[in-house]
Amino acid sequence: MKKSLMVLIAVMFSISLVVGGCAKKSSSEEIIYSLKNIDSYTCDVNIDFKNDRQVISNSGKQYYDKNVGYRFDLGSDRTFTYKSNSIYVNDIKNGSRYTTDMDFDSVYKLTFINEYIGLLYNDEQIKTSIKTKDNIQYLAISLLIPGGNRNMKTAELFVETKTNLPEYLIIYDEKGNEKLNATYTNFKPDAQISSEIFKTQ
């Protein structure tokens, strides 16, 4: 009798753990709502560019503030500050600065989460699905990338369902081939960022 009671208690405890674990995972709507409400963030990012012959890897740090702009530090060599439809480039390695049009960069700016926050409001063809990688559950958000670039046609953003934080971004060409893979670490939403970060002079 005691043995049966102990088995029953163990089973009930296991079920409560499973149910409790599932309850902590957010729904698709909650995750998308959470992303839409990110006003600022900082994170480290590793970016792999893929073509038919090789994979080129870059790493850096991103800063975003919806009221100011956003910035990408490419290693210790260059910084890209995006403000008012312009990109302010500081080439630290060569000691030069220059400004270019926002449309000139069709790669690095697509790795910023805020690019997809905007699309979440406007893209009517958003598709979501639950995917598991390394025993971690993600909401995969698939979006069309505007602009007509055949090499950057669609994006799939992977958001961890327990934290509501983005961890991966994959960009595909028009044939469905993977062209870019970005991995985000140390992602801090609604971070307090000094305005000095976005100064261009």
Image (cartoon, helix red, strand yellow):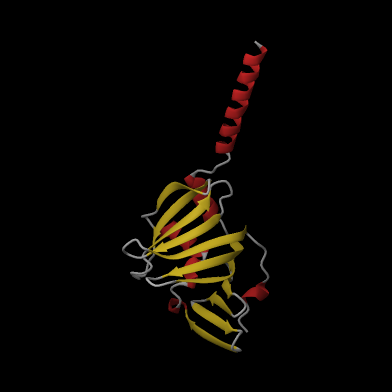
Residue at position x 66%, y 67% from top?
Answer: 193
| Residue sitting nearer the eye, 34 or 56 | 56
> Which residue is drawn at the image coordinates 58% and 37% (left, top)?
21
Compared with residue 48, is residue 23 higher up or lower down, i.e. above or below?
above
x 42%, y 63%: residue: 171
Q: Residue 64 appears at what percent x and percent y?
A: 58, 67
Quadrant of residue 67 within the rendered picture: bottom right
Name the image quarter holding residue 77. bottom right
- Residue extending furthest toward the top: 1
Q: How many numbered markers are drawn?
A: 0
Tell me the residue at 34%/61% (across/down). Answer: 176
User: Residue 5's quadrant in the figure?
Assistant: top right
Q: Position of residue 31 (x, y in %)?
A: 52, 49
Residue 135 in view of the camera: yes
Q: x and y percent of residue 89 in the render?
A: 55, 82
Identify the residue at the far left of this view: 175
Question: From the image, which quarter does the C terminus lie in?
Answer: bottom right
For the residue pair 22 and 134, the one nearer the viewer reads as: 134
Instruction: Answer above or below: position of 10 versus 52.
Output: above
Q: Which of 151/4 is in front?
A: 4
Q: Is residue 29 left or right of residue 147?
A: right
Query: Compared to 171, does 90 lie above or below?
Result: below
Residue 39 visible at all: no
Residue 94's spot in the image, x, y percent?
Answer: 59, 88
Q: In the picture, which quadrant includes the N terminus? A: top right
